[in-house]
Image (cartoon, grey):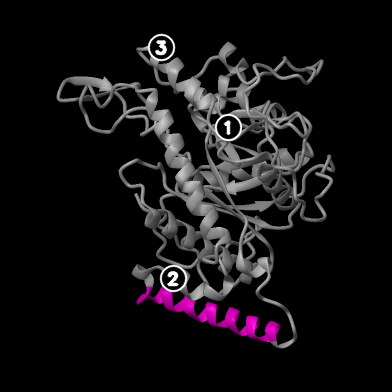
Amino acid sequence: VNLIIRSILLLSSINETPIDADMKLSISSAALLFASGLNGGAAFVPVSLGSASKSSLSMVASVPKSSSAPASPTQKEWSPSSWKNAVAKQMPVYENEEELEEAIQTLNGVAPLVFAGEVRSLHEKLARVSQGQGFVLMGGDCAESFKEFHVNHVRDNFRVIMQMALVMTFGSAMPVVKIGRMAGQFAKPRSEPNEVIDGVSLPSYRGDNVNQEEFTPEARRNNPFLMVKAYHQSAQTLNILRAFSTGGFADISRLHAWNLDFVENTEEGSRYRRLAAKVDESLRFMKAIGVDTSKPEFTSVDFYTAHECLLLPYEQALTRQDSTTGKWYDCSSHMLWVGERTRDLDGAHLEFTRGIGNPLGVKISDKCTPEELIRIIETMNPQNIPGKLSIIVRMGAEKLRKNLPGLIRAVQREGKAVVWISDPVH
């Protein structure tokens, strides 16, 4: 399902103060996330929090077997494979272990999709957001597919996010961290392991990197080589995104070109054009007083990717150890989140994510209690590092009004530094 935006969006802060009373929030997107930071504890902040850093992108070429860092006295020793000692929910069962091993070995030898320096850059930006110094905008498809992959689809998702980020930045006068739910968002959790149609039971469709959607025994067979195919499509998607973000498409002087065709003749499109005219006027003023708008700050953007950490064999195979810091990073994406159905405290997904250096997210619903949320935070971010963990709230409007305030108060009371993200799809 293509990402569809039928209106221009502005984000208000967590206290519901509107940025612009004349602009209303309206969405029909498949997946849009907005975030506002709340002040957390005065824990360690990355040393370059006050200025942009150019971290080394150096990575090891091979995949070491275990972490060389000593284990904390209060935590179990971690390695990229230690998740196998815990219960892994929502995992496909592969009937051919030799095929699975072959696919994993192939992924062990491929190049990282993202690099440690990029991940650290995102972490530092999220640290600022967690201290109330910015917003997060995340958008993309509910799930990527092989059939719908096309450069135009990636471009349209990218320019929608660019358009929305421009509105948010102009309206809030604060930086917006742009994250695409792309280049890895294939796997889908399921309520039931099997699907029954007309009395025929077959394995549930779990996403294009696991099996195929057609209701046939051949298509629904869990195929480990689809992980390799997903890797290659993700690599193409990231190449396209990097070209758009640095190759001139993101130049703010082209902001009129970001308007999608289907909103061109709508009221929302007209409102965007009026805002774009204001930005144009500001740019002309800046040029008149001698500001060079051809610098990278005006012609390119930092764009990051994220997906749900669900298919653990894939994530483990793409985990690498940074040669400059010795830390482990899941190089399948800049950011990963753990879903509502896999966030068990003693589960495999939290075990895997607690040891990687990527910024993390965890989805919570009205089922999550304040006490449970604090335990999740302490498991995923035991050092309380700002920017490390985002809480993605997926509740309906009524449940959110009832349950979210208590969760926020608990996090503030414990001094936890998190980024709050609202998933308005749910």
User: Which residue position is annotated with label 1?
Assistant: 368
Q: Which residues are magenta?
A: 264-287
Q: Quadrant of the C terminus?
A: top left
Amino acid type shown at disc 3 = Glu
Q: Residue at x 66, y 36 (%)?
A: 358
Which circle marks residue 259 in the picture? 2
Which of the two residues, 252 or 426, is positioned nearer the viewer here?
A: 252
Provide the major secondary structure of the magenta segment.
helix
Query: Is the C-beta separation of discs 3 and 2 under 8 Å?
Result: no
Give SS at disc 3: helix
Question: Does residue 228 appear to the left or right of 252 in the view shown?
Answer: left
* In front: label 3 or label 2: 3
Q: Amino acid at mark 1?
A: Cys
Q: Which residue is mark 3?
A: 98
* Numbered tag placed on residue 377 in the rendering: none
Disc 3 or 2, which lies upstream in sequence?
3
| Count of numbered marks | 3
